[in-house]
Amino acid sequence: KKQLFICTANDNDFTSWVDLLGDGSNDIIPKEKIIITFDNTTTGGQYGGCMSDLRLGFENGFATPNKVQDEYENAKFTMTKDGNGLNRSDFTIDSNPTPTDNQIVGTIKTSGIYQETYHKIAHVFKKYNGGSDECCLWSSSGTREVSIELENTPMPNKLFARGNGYYGQTEITNVRVKKSIFIGEQEIQSEDFNVEKLEASSDTYGDYAFLFEISKQDQIVMKKELNLNPKNTKKYKKM
């Protein structure tokens, strides 16, 4: 199979290569992703407990959910960086949320969600005010991982969620945040960020509130690079 690569982007760290004779599947285009993961553990109530009010904070405050896929355990979403996220939750359901100006796009994933329409992971973005459809719900007690993946956006400086909902409570622990570079599905470089749990006033954030601050570490603490195949004509990083 013939390949003809051309460099389409070049900066101090990475280059992008497109195969002019291919269908795009072999293109070497680095993508930056922010990956936030945490553990969610049942602490009370029925089934596996709930979570709601999930928000990401930036320089001007918390972003507002805009559009969300109506999926049980793997949902794409957009948020508007308007600083008004704590006061609004009027997002709409969309089969393929696409960001516009001043918006971010991401995906949220988990497992073990109760298989009922009103408790999908998409409902984690709702503000909980006592309604049975204003939270996501896990099917059984225990600990499970929740992950948020953002593409091509500045690093958030805050993570907020309430471990509360109609059917019970949960606790959020072990928050990890990193910025990674991917080529296809291969992670080639990553940088861990500091995470600190903050006091969350019930007057501002409500009951069962969990608030975390995200900040940059002094240096890259983990870095991985692909091994180059000398027979491969593809180049991914300037030396």
Image (spheres, helix red, strand yellow):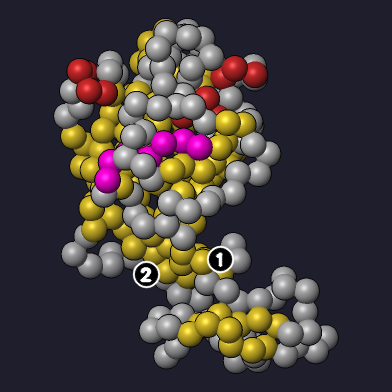
Under mark 1, the amino acid is: Gln
Near mark 1 (Cα within 10 A), the count class, few <14, some 14-19 or many ≥20, is few
**Label 1 – label 2 distance at C-alpha:** 13 Å
Secondary element type, mark 1? strand
**Which residue does the image show at 30% across and 47% down from the upper left?**
58
Q: Residue at x 16, y 29 (%)?
A: 199
Q: Which mark is residue 142?
A: none
Q: Position of residue 25 (x, y in %)?
A: 72, 71
Q: Residue 160: name its quadrant.
A: top left
Disc 2 residue type? Lys
Which mark, residue 186? 1
Mark 2 closeness class: few <14, some 14–19, many ≥20 residues within 10 Å = few
Please identify the quarter of the rendering in which residue 197 is found.
Answer: top left
Which quadrant, please, contains the N terminus?
bottom right
Q: Is residue 103 left or right of residue 16?
A: left
Spot occupied by residue 196 in the image (x, y as percentages of width and height)? 21, 42
Identify the image quadrant of residue 165: top left
Give SS at disc 2. Answer: loop
> Residue, x 40% and y 31% (percent of image)?
54
